[in-house]
């Protein structure tokens, strides 16, 4: 996401001819967009995206369990056990 934001900022600076970016080649201005595309391709290929989504779901589940345990007056769980592959 940072590369995408950087690409948008550089694109606007180039388009409005502001600062040193006005003199840069378009290849340098558009390079962050290519970097973002490569990052997303790698994240999907390696399973990084899915793993992060599963960790987020596990944390939500643990938070929900802890809310219910605290309402019953029990000690909250501290961590989610690791997933088996």
Image (spheres, rainbow, N blue to C red):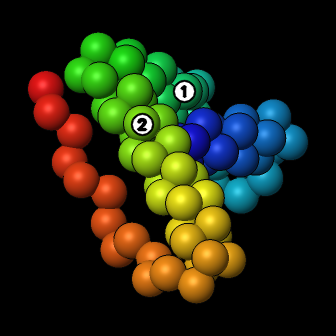
Q: In which quarter of the image is the N terminus?
A: top right
Q: Mark 1: few, some, or many residues within 10 Å (few <14, many ≥20)?
A: some
**17 in relation to 43, above or below:** below
Whole-angstrom CA distance, mark 2 to mark 1, is 27 Å
- Return the mark for residue 54: 2
- Relative to 19, say whether 13 is above or below: above
Q: Quick one: SS at disc 2?
A: helix
**In front of the other: 43 or 10:** 43
Element carrying mark 1 = helix
Among the 4 quarters of the image, the one containing residue 54: top left
Q: Is residue 84 left or right of residue 78?
A: left
Q: Nearer the viewer, residue 56 or 9?
A: 56
- Residue sitting farthest toward the right: 16
- Residue 42 showing in the rendered view: no
- The percent coordinates of residue 72 (x first, y second) are 62, 76
**Which of 80 and 8 lies nearest the eye of the viewer?**
80
Q: Residue 55: which quarter of the image?
A: top left
Q: Is residue 5 left or right of residue 80?
A: right
Which quadrant, please, contains the C terminus? top left
- Please state the horizontal and vertical placement of residue 9, each as a whole percent of the image: 71, 47
Above-or-below relation of 8 to 36: below
Q: Report x, y in % for residue 64.
A: 61, 58
Q: Do the residues labelled 2 and 1 touch (CB within 8 Å)?
A: no
> Which numbered disc covers residue 47?
none
Q: Position of residue 43 (x, y in %)?
A: 35, 26
Residue at 39% of width from left, 71% of height from top? 77
Number of numbered discs: 2
- Closer to the chain start, of discs 2 and 1, is 1
The residue to which callout 1 is attached is: 33
Q: State left or right for residue 66 relative to residue 41.
A: right
């Amino acid at each position: 996401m940072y590369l995408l934001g950087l690409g948008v900022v550089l694109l606007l600076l180039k388009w409005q001819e502001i600062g040193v970016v006005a003199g840069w080649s378009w290849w340098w201005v558009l390079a962050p967009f290519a970097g973002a595309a490569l990052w997303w391709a790698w994240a999907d290929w390696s399973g990084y995206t899915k793993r992060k989504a599963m960790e987020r779901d596990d944390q939500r589940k643990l938070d929900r369990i802890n809310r219910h345990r605290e309402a019953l007056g029990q000690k909250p769980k501290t961590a989610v056990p690791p997933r088996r592959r």
